[in-house]
Amino acid sequence: MSDICEVCGLPKEICVCEDIAREQQKISITIDRRRYGKMMTIIDGINSHELDIDALISNLKSICACGGTIKDGKIELQGDHRTKVKETLEKMGFMVEVI
Ligand SMILES: [Zn+2]
């Protein structure tokens, strides 16, 4: 028995729901300057119903070798990691906009 997608009812091997969900999500990356000139990379527009935000932040933290938190559904990474975050999310199939 193969797994059946709950959304479209097709076997998971041929279901494209997840791909479609990713294409429809547009993630924005912004830089926020905090006190003492600290930079934060803010990743907004993540749909937590479609995507495991906890897995994503731990992945990004290890790729960027930085600390980070989830706040109001946004990922905040310490430092300026626009390029790496954009590359990583695009590889995962997301639409990314750097503001
Ligand atoms: Zn499906």
Image (cartoon, rainbow, N blue to C red):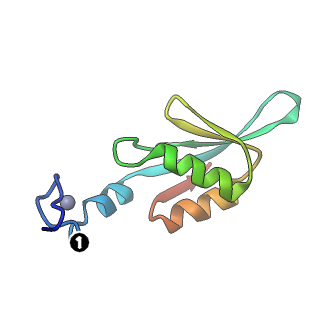
Whole-percent x, y for residue 56 in the image = 52, 50
Q: Residue furthest front?
A: 1
Q: How many marks?
A: 1
Binning the other alpha carbons within 10 Å of mark 1 as few (below 14), some (14 to 19) or many (20 upward) gives: few
Whole-percent x, y for residue 16 in the image = 25, 66
Taking the spot 68% from the left edge, 60% from the top edge, the residue there is 83
Q: Residue furthest right?
A: 36
Taking the spot 50% from the left edge, 49% from the top edge, the residue there is 55
> In the displayed structure, would residue 2 be above or below residue 82?
below
Report whether 72 appears left or right of 38: left
Quadrant location of residue 21? bottom left
Whole-percent x, y for residue 79 in the image = 77, 45
Q: Which residue does the numbered mark 1 point to in the structure image? A: 13
Tell me the quadrant of the picture where the N terminus can be found. Answer: bottom left
Report whether 72 appears left or right of 83: left
Please tell me in which quarter of the rendered image ligand 1 is found. Answer: bottom left
Quadrant location of residue 42? top right
> In the displayed structure, would residue 14 be above or below residue 34?
below
Front-most of residues 52 and 31: 52
Taking the spot 48% from the left edge, 44% from the top edge, the residue there is 53
- Label 1: element kind: loop
Front-most of residues 63 and 2: 2
Report whether 34 appears left or right of 59: right
Taking the spot 13% from the left edge, 65% from the top edge, the residue there is 10
At label 1, the amino acid type is Glu
Q: Is mark 1 within 8 Å of ligand 1?
A: no
